[in-house]
Image (spheres, grey):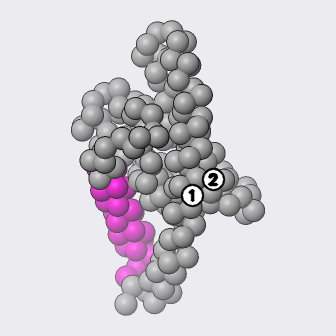
Amino acid sequence: MKNNTYKIALFGVLSAVALTLSYLEGLIPTVAFMPPGAKMGFSNIATMFAASSMGIVSALAITFIKALFAGITRGVTAFFMSLCGGILSTVTMYLLFKLSKKTGYMAIGIICALVHNFGQLIVAIITAGNLSVLGYAPVLLISGTVTGAVTGTVLRAVMPALEKVTETITRKGGK
């Protein structure tokens, strides 16, 4: 398999994984300690892997696909919240992966969850037409820290296996 074919296949798989995880998260009832509307963000594991192994363009494309899915399944506001938070978060995670080899997955997960929440707050302020939604910021700070830590921890656990699989396929030429 040529390298381009491999990249296209990996992109397709990561996109499918991200959409599947996003859909499955929507089926889970809100956990008692989570605020309304909060999700664990497991679909971001696919985006984080894409950002670290495929680059910013692929990671942003997966982010856009996830936002489009949110728009189709939950409406226009969900699309813009997902897109704005996702773009800011994806660019941040890419920069963290590239600029600091010492930043751990948990830290990246937390930082990116908080940046994602900030992007969503921007959309909420624009949608509401006032700053009153900033009252929800402390709730998002706490939930973003928790969900980002969980997502980062899961990524840290699965990353060695993901890297090994992609390295093996690349090295063997897809045989």
Q: Quadrant of the C terminus?
A: bottom left
In the picture, measured across the screen, residue 73 lies left or right of residue 6, that is left
Is residue 3 positioned above or below 121 on the image?
A: below
Q: What element does badge 1 sit on?
A: helix
Question: How many residues crowd around disc 1 within 10 Å: few (fewer than 14), some, or many (20 or more)?
Answer: many
Choose mark 1 or mark 2, whichever is in front.
1
The percent coordinates of residue 27 (x first, y second) are 27, 47
The percent coordinates of residue 31 (x first, y second) are 39, 44
The percent coordinates of residue 84 (x first, y second) are 48, 33
Evaluate if marks 1 and 2 touch, with contact meaning CB atoms under 8 Å apart. Answer: yes
What numbered label is drawn on residue 108? Answer: 2
Q: Is residue 28 magenta?
A: no
Q: Which residues are magenta?
A: 1-23
Question: How many residues crowd around disc 2 within 10 Å: few (fewer than 14), some, or many (20 or more)?
Answer: many
In the picture, measured across the screen, residue 107 lies left or right of residue 174, that is right
For mark 1, what is the residue?
A: 152
Residue furthest left in the image = 73
The percent coordinates of residue 123 (x first, y second) are 47, 24
Residue 102 seen in the figure: yes
